[in-house]
Image (cartoon, grey):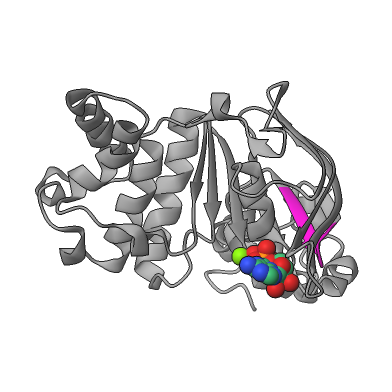
Amino acid sequence: MFTLNHVSYSYKADSPVRAQALSDISLSIKKGECVGLIGHTGSGKSTLAQILSGLLTPTSGTVSFEDTPLFIKNKFNRALRGQIGLVFQYPEYQLFEETVLKDIAYGPMNLGATQSEAFHKARTAAQLLGLSEEVFDKSPLQLSGGQKRRVAIAGILAMEPQVLILDEPTAGLDPEGREELLKILKNLHKSTGNTTILISHSMDFVAGFTERIIVLNRGSLWMDGTPQEIFSDPEKLKVAGLAPPPVSELFSLFGFPVPPVFTAEEAVSALLPYMHQGGGSVCK
Ligand code: ADP
Ligand code: MG
């Protein structure tokens, strides 16, 4: 789906305050893949997301999308408009319409859908994000933080992109909103089969979600593998300013003879046999 060849990006490339954000990134992402993009703050995750969605043109290197160049003469290839959906960090700041449904319908209208088509797409997207009919005619400002976030994501989904890129989708949500969104996003990937790129600095979040993890370190591609491959090399992660999910660290300290564990749910499944043996307590 995406092929990046030697992609670099510098902010203010022609000025003395040039800031190199990405250096020589080569990778490809297959159709339908669900990929976690992780890295310390400032490692280049958001820059890469903006390149993949055509908002920033690489300073050097090439990007193609399904064999079509993503950029032509240093500009986003308009033929690919609407195919790559980027949900920015804190996307709810950009909600502006009077009602939830109008806000979600804005994207498809902008891509040329008629009003009734756009509202139909908006309803479908809202349902996929677990938003009930009752909120459709409310002002987005009346909603909870978690709901607002879901409205913003629905607005991107309503454009029916082939790729969904989410930049820190759970940042700033309370634990309940976070859990809810995580569940919804998992189901979404199952039901749409969309290529999904999930940016996070939270290890357990991506571990519970993705089948492949790409790690950036100071603008370079540092690691690329399954969660198991990535988290079994804590030393290399540490150099990138990261650590495996707390649960897997705990399990390796215990030295439990269980398969690798990355999330709380996996920990529970791994511990169940011990609980039955030990009459309810795993520590006896
Ligand atoms: P991340 O999303 O992983 O935190 P970013 O892609 O936002 O990282 O940033 C990568 C690097 O680019 C950082 O060093 C950051 O300071 C720099 N950077 C990001 N945005 C800008 C900008 N608009 N102008 C100059 N430098 C920037
Ligand atoms: Mg960022």
Q: Which residues are magenta?
A: 213-220
In which image quadrant can residue 205 be found? bottom right
Percent x, y of residue 130: 28, 46
Quadrant assignment for the N terminus: top right
The answer to whether any part of residue 11 appears in the image is yes
Percent x, y of residue 165: 55, 46
Q: Quadrant of ligand 2?
A: bottom right
Q: Is residue 116 magenta?
A: no
Residue 130's place in the image compared with 177, above or below, is above
Percent x, y of residue 124: 27, 32
Please name whichever residue, 27 or 76, is drawn nearer the observer in this view of the structure.
76
Please name whichever residue, 262 or 79, is drawn nearer the observer in this view of the structure.
79
Q: How many marks?
A: 0
Q: What is the residue that sits farthest to the front in this orientation?
A: 15
The answer to whether any part of residue 41 appears in the image is no
Q: Main secondary structure of the magenta part?
A: strand
Identity of the residue drawn at 14% across and 46% down: 136
In which image quadrant can residue 139 be found? bottom left
Identity of the residue drawn at 61% across and 42% down: 54
Quadrant assignment for the C terminus: bottom right
Please name whichever residue, 118 or 271, is drawn nearer the observer in this view of the structure.
118
Identity of the residue drawn at 87% across and 63% down: 233
Identity of the residue drawn at 59% across and 47% down: 55
In which image quadrant can residue 199 be found? bottom right
Residue 16's place in the image compared with 96, above or below, is below
Percent x, y of residue 107: 34, 39
For this view, does 40 lie left or right of residue 110? right
For this view, does 273 lie left or right of residue 116? right
For this view, does 257 lie left or right of residue 177? right
